[in-house]
Image (cartoon, rainbow, N blue to C red):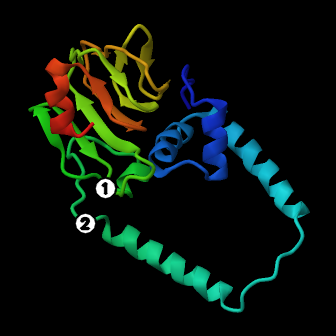
Amino acid sequence: MTTHTHHPSDALIAGFATGSLPLGPSLAVRLHVEICAACQSSVQEIEAAQGQLLLLQPDAPMRPDALQRALDAVDVGVEAMATGPEGSSRPSDICLPASLADIGLAAPVHLTPDAWVAHLAAPRVGGWRTYLFCAPAGTALPTHGHLGDELIMVLEGGFDDGRTFVSGDFVENTTGFVHTMQVWPNSRMVALISSGDAIAWRPADRHIGARLDI
């Protein structure tokens, strides 16, 4: 595995390992953990500690139909994965990680022929907007702020915003953070972005957010 410079925070890793994150943030963290040995180790340590805590808990009585209810829930989940989300789409020239492909994407919305957003084909939870973002080489996104926390998992290419991020890096921007993203000049950028609220665009650029629903 490649060594990465930028990782999810300890709080995000803990939330992912314990299953307490909403779908969007959890998916963003998962895509990084799947390719990062250091973060995999951190997740395993937390899961092991959680397992030890469970062993110390007293046995709880189970409902007589508990097993059947659990099996029914599994059957529903398997059927949903087999059929795929209604209206989902996979951009043809992008190899999606399996954990993202299983959920699916809505049809891409284009800002230009080569710059587009495809939202996750799943209900929004807790206000989180999660989408695949593709921008051609050399794209400069206008300066913008954030009304909620923003998580970016770079899947292809890279960008600079006063910091440098490459494929596999995880970016964590807090509410109110302001930056200008410059895609590298030699390759497009593809990233999964999960944002806790809308982007705060300047008045002249609000048409971008309106069109892309970001």
Circle 2 — which element? loop
Relative to residue 204, is residue 144 drawn left or right?
right
Residue at (24% x, 51% y) in the render: 90
Q: Position of residue 56 (x, y in %)?
A: 90, 61
Instruction: Name the residue nearer the viewer: 154 or 2.
Output: 154
In the rendered image, which residue does mark 1 sit on? 121
| CA neighbours of label 2 inside 10 A, class few (<14), some (14 to 19), many (20+) | few
Residue at the limit of the structure toward the left, as seen here: 113
Residue at horizontal 67%, vertical 51%? 18
Give the Cα separation between the discs numbered 2 and 1: 8 Å
The answer to which of 14 and 145 lies nearer the viewer is 145
Report whether 3 appears left or right of 186: right
- Tell me the tag on residue 86: 2
Which residue sits at x=40%, y=36%? 195
Residue 27 location (% of width, % of height): 47, 46
In contact (CB < 8 Å): disc 2 and disc 1 = yes
Q: Position of residue 106 (x, y in %)?
A: 24, 52
Query: Residue 178 sits in which quadrant?
Result: top left
- Residue drawn at x 43%, y 21% is 176
Looking at the rendered structure, the kind of residue marked 2 is Glu
Q: Amino acid at mark 1?
A: Ala
- Image quadrant assignment for residue 141: top left
Q: Is residue 181 above or below residue 69?
A: above
For the C terminus, the quadrant is top left
Per the rendering, the mark at residue 184 is none
